[in-house]
Amino acid sequence: MWRIAFVLMAAALTSAAQAADWYETRGWAPIINGNVEAARERAVENALRQGLDLAGGSVQSVEEVVDGVITGQRMQWRSNGAIEHAELVRERTNKQRHEVTLRTLIRPNVSACGNSQYKPAVVLAPFEVAFPEHLRHGDIQTIGATSSFRFSRLLGQHSQSLRVAQLLSAPQGVSRFVKANQNVELAEFTRRVAREYNSQYIIAGIFHDLSATPVDGPNLLFWRHPAHNRQFELSLYLLDGYSGELLTTASVSGLTAWPYPYNAQVDTSSDAFWRNEFGQQLESRMRDLVYGFDQKLQCQGLKGLVLRTDNEQIYTNLGERNLIMPGTKAQLLHRGGFLDELGQYREQWVVNPAELVVTQVYGSSSVLQVSNGEPLIGVQQRDIILIK
């Protein structure tokens, strides 16, 4: 039986007493240009990711993505939900796709973060294109919207740290803010959108490159157009919805053959587009970004806004959708600020020493009060609730 070799890294947070479990998962990938071996690799990767998702694992190799760039064609599998053993149960070629079934022994991840069970809300802005002229080849004007939609689905399927609250319908001009280094305007946009959709985070994306280049080779007949390769470079910006701060930038890139005729008008919303080599690579890289953001946020606190106060009770915008339950402990942060030595205003948060407890929970809101019944002083709307 064919066996799969992995590079395993012992996770410091994984207890030796934590039992490993067996998972059987199926993965598949389309066969592109007759390359069965490449389809097998993608099918195995797909099946492995499913097993890690089920076990609560994560792929450590995405550390190459967050705050960096990943350009390689192959992944090195390392996991907090450590894969101790994997074997191929069966595989077959079914028409134009290759299918595999894997049996894996996975030791689940044991997180040191007490708040890891909560899911903050995130708003996605449609991905923008830095150089619109790159879209002419293939007439792929909609690739920003369709890519952001596919990324929202990947977040819903794979993220253990984020819950998609909204995918905005129109570009928000983030590329203009980034290109002109307009940090104040970007922060104002972030806080406004976060308030509107009750979200802790905003993710915006920019394609910095989508250019197509002719493939080198012997001269063709004058009435024929040469084949092209197409490359992409996509940067995602993770923004804090309450402070407006840019938390991190993650970038991915790739280069594949462009399988369409020179004058084709390509429908980037079609399933056929995302099954070809370019679409497959772009979606795989976006999936890596999902895992990267999960790693970045896995120990971040869940935050919400104070909506109002009434008779020593505090109403917040966190609720069942964020997996909040009665009895959940929380802390109150008061909004404040100061002027630095250059005269610039700096926002800061003042921690209230009182301990709060959730008493009532609704779909998108909850009610809190001080655990010892003491009165709260100085609570204002838009103060921050931090879930412990």
Image (cartoon, rainbow, N blue to C red):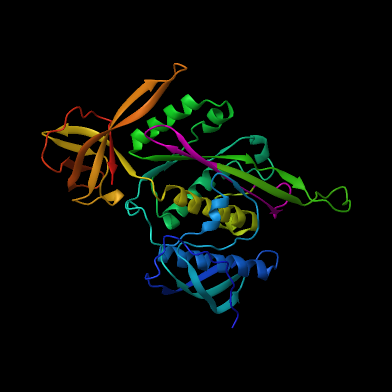
**Residue at left offset 59%, top offset 65%:** 42
348 within the magenta span: no
Foreground residue among 98 and 16: 16
Q: Which residues are magenta?
A: 236-265
Determine whether, in the image, residue 215 is placed left or right of residue 207: right
Total labels: the figure holds 0
**Residue at left offset 61%, top offset 35%:** 130
Foreground residue among 313 and 350: 350
**Residue at left offset 58%, top offset 49%:** 268
Most frequent secondary structure within the magenta stretch: strand
Foreground residue among 20 and 169: 20
Determine whether, in the image, residue 234 is placed left or right of residue 202: right
How far across and how far down the image is residue 235, in percent? 57, 42
Specify the quadrant of the image occupied by residue 110.
bottom left
Residue extending farthest to the top is 343
Determine whether, in the image, residue 384 is placed left or right of residue 51: left
How far across and how far down the image is residue 153, in percent? 46, 53
Q: Which image quarter is the N terminus in?
A: bottom right
- Establish if 381 lies above or below 290: above
**Residue at left offset 46%, top offset 68%:** 51
How far across and how far down the image is residue 131, in percent? 64, 35
